[in-house]
Image (spheres, rainbow, N blue to C red):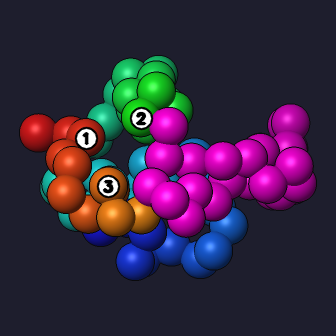
Amino acid sequence: VGFQLLPDVFTLTELQKAYEIILEEQLDKRNFRRKILSAEILEETGEKKKEGEGRPAMLYRYREDAVAEVKTRRLFP
């Protein structure tokens, strides 16, 4: 569902916020990142997004070949 609510490129934080809104619950940042990255449905764009203080966030996009798989597989209960 997340791929329909986000722009073409996004940060992991933006993706996590979308999942939290849909699931109506807070998700642990480390566990979310581990699960979403291990699912191999995202690819890095090679670009970064600078927002406020701190290190710029890596930008990701859904892998085109993984979109159909995302629609049928549930990553979070």
Q: What residue type is labelled 1?
A: Leu
Report x, y in % for residue 20: 30, 52
Verify whether residue 69 appears in magenta.
Answer: no
Report x, y in % for residue 36: 43, 37
In front: mark 3 or mark 2?
3
Give the spatial CA distance, label 2 vs label 1.
8 Å
Q: What residue type is labelled 2?
A: Ala
Report x, y in % for residue 7: 59, 77
Identify the residue shown where x is 67% and y is 53%.
Answer: 60
Give the spatial CA distance, label 3 vs label 2.
10 Å
Q: Name the residue under label 3.
A: 69
On the rendered image, what quadrant is the N terminus found in? bottom left
Q: 76 above or below 64?
A: above
* Numbered badge on residue 75: 1
* Magenta stretch, residue numbers: 40-66
Q: Mark 2 points at which residue?
A: 39
Mark 2 and mark 1 lie on one chain; the one further toward the N terminus is 2
Q: 49 above or below 76?
A: below
